[in-house]
Amino acid sequence: MIALVAGATRGTGRGIAVALGEAGATVYCAGRSTRERRSEMNRPETIEETAELVTAAGGTGIPVRADFLEPEQVAALAERVRREQGRLDVLVNDIWGGDHLWTWNTPVWRHDQDKGLRLLRLAVDTHLISARHLLPLLIENEGGLVVEVTDGTWEFNETRYRENVYYDLAKMSVNRLGYAWANELRPYGGTGLAVTPGFLRSEAMLDNFGVTEDTWREAKADPTWMVSETPAYLGRGVAALARDPDRARWSGKSVTSEELALAYDITDLDGSRPRVWSYITEVREKGGETGWEGYR
């Protein structure tokens, strides 16, 4: 399996890349943060680290620095994959980089417009540029898979306003891209869909709460945190999906890490099966503050 994860530096992208490595894949780990230069996110994680984790997991990790807002860089990446591998089987679009650009519960007339528009470019334009240059390689062989990573399914986001207009548009747009690729890949036997993690214990989120993966339960957070998951959880779901000969049944859908875990009988690293979206809709939105134990 030849895979490319766009946005593999940290979080869900890293989790998916490593899980594909566990499945024996060769994974191009693309992103902007390297050991020599950080992206505007100014985080310490690098694509080299991700590639090393992929290799340690049993695959072959190849770090590639690429800014997905620069079409010529993505075109060069596509040509490199073609030259070195001759094909592409799996494309994961997890490019984001907008955490520092949006403000919670802020109306459009109060939100910094330049930051909001930059967020949309990072969240949507990058995915379009990725698809434009990498899908021609993917469709050369039947059965290609494109996974769009977002926050919240289409069904969940459709009836809930997600924090502010820029974030809301970004996450709904990426859901729609999963549906778009399903339609554009269908004549070539390909599959496209959107996936979402739950409350993610990413590197940045652990830092925000001042905890580690070993001490995460000590964080002073709302009860939803107790149903959080590691990046490996969705990663394992995507890897199982990539190995599924009947994966076309998912095409056009927008699904959670929970749904993939149930379908493929997988768990998170600690053996649990977090169900954060079910907890939010079945407990939190109905005024409940406890009962999370039944959702992991």
Image (cartoon, grey):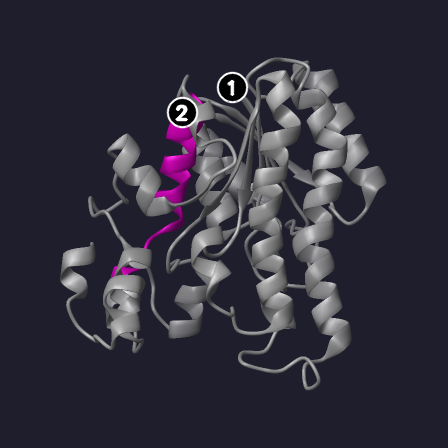
Q: Quick one: which residue is furthest to the right in this view? A: 72
Residue found 80% across the figure and 39% down from its top: 73
Residue found 77% across the figure and 49% down from its top: 69
Left or right: residue 115 versus residue 273 is right
Q: Quadrant of residue 137?
A: top right
Q: Is residue 281 magenta?
A: no
Label placed on residue 23: 2
Q: Position of residue 268 (x, y in %)?
A: 28, 45
Please state the extent of the stretch shown in magenta in the rendering.
227-243
Identity of the amino acid at label 1?
Met
Q: Main secondary structure of the magenta part?
A: helix
Label 1 – label 2 distance at C-alpha = 9 Å
Q: Nearer the viewer, residue 99 or 144?
A: 144
Label placed on residue 1: 1
Callout 2 environment at 10 Å: few (<14), some (14 to 19), or many (20+)?
some
Q: Is residue 241 magenta?
A: yes
User: What SS does tag 2 mark?
Assistant: loop
